[in-house]
Amino acid sequence: MEQAERFNSIEKALRILLSFQAEHPFWGVRELSAHLGFSPATVQRILQVLKSNGFVAQDPATRQYRLGVVFYTFLHALKGAYPIGRAGQPFLQGLLEATGETVHLNIIEGAERVCIDTLESRQVLKASMPVGSRSPLYAGASSKCLLAFSDESFRERYLDKLTVLTPFTERTITDWQVLRRDLESIAARGYATSLGERNRGLGSLSAPVFGHRGQLLGSLSLAVPEIRYKDSGYRSFCIAELCRQAQVFSRMMGCEIGDGGTGPAKREKVE
């Protein structure tokens, strides 16, 4: 509890809000108190202030708290804050209609992949990728795509600072040389693939989106359940559609595809 006292009221409120994640969307006062090391009275007081301003809501039956609807207004602001987010909706929609799989758009923020937009599959068996979800840049197709096509100086700084490749599953790459070879292969063929590296049973396909100077803007990705991902013909179809949408997206963002620069078109090679 001594460590908890080092935080001021604003920091405590932020830590409370950040505790509401997809894997734990509901919290009771005492459970949240034990999780954060704050006193129940402190948690209760802050939650009441957050509730009065719409940041959290309370279930009348269970008395547990969840995030409030005010956060939906932030989704529009988030999309508007990034040029790629404002422009990406037609391409996410086109890819969803073509493949039927969950589509998401990602950027690099700091040393992580962050999902800034998503359209969820309407199929019964589907994968999800919530807006705001994060992952390290070495695990999963969306992350590795961003790392492989990022500026070389950024990529080398990132790899130099990594002290360990922490595994998420038994399929996560934990060998430095294997990771470097994988990044080279991704850059050569123009897209990234992965199966079960971040989450068991989930396959991922990702292609880069570039700007007018050939700079990486983000990655356009498909999240595919393993049973469909393992169908090689279907996977090839999804890769082709993904690369096509990423190329058109890049052109719209000003990238001159096929000019000898870093655009994905000339490297596309479907597995």
Image (spheres, rainbow, N blue to C red):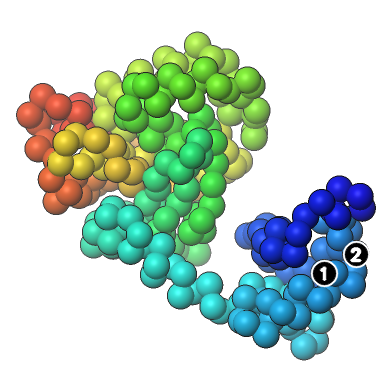
Residue located farthest toward the bottom when viewing the structure as drawn? 60
Coordinates of residue 72 in the picture (x, y in percent): 49, 74
The local secondary structure at tag 2 comes to loop
| Residue contact between numbered discs 2 and 1, judged by CB atoms under 8 Å | yes
Q: CA distance from mark 2 to mark 1?
A: 6 Å
Using residue 76 as the reference point, say whether residue 248 is left or right of it: left
Residue found at x 46% / y 22%: 157
The quadrant of the rendering that contains the C terminus is top left
Residue found at x 86% / y 48%: 3
Can you see residue 104?
yes
Marker disc for residue 39: 2
Label 1 CA crowd tier, 10 Å (few <14, some 14–19, many 20+): many
Q: Nearer the viewer, residue 170 or 187?
A: 187
Q: Nearer the viewer, residue 135 or 73?
A: 73
Residue 150 higher or lower than 73, as above or below: above
Using residue 68 as the reference point, say whether residue 268 is left or right of it: left
Residue located farthest toward the top when viewing the structure as drawn? 177
Q: Nearer the viewer, residue 215 or 21?
A: 215
Q: Indicate the amino acid at tag 2.
A: Ser
Q: Quadrant of residue 29?
A: bottom right
Q: How many marks?
A: 2
Q: Say which residue label 1 marks.
A: 43
The local secondary structure at tag 1 comes to helix
Q: Quadrant of residue 89?
A: bottom left
Marker disc for residue 61: none
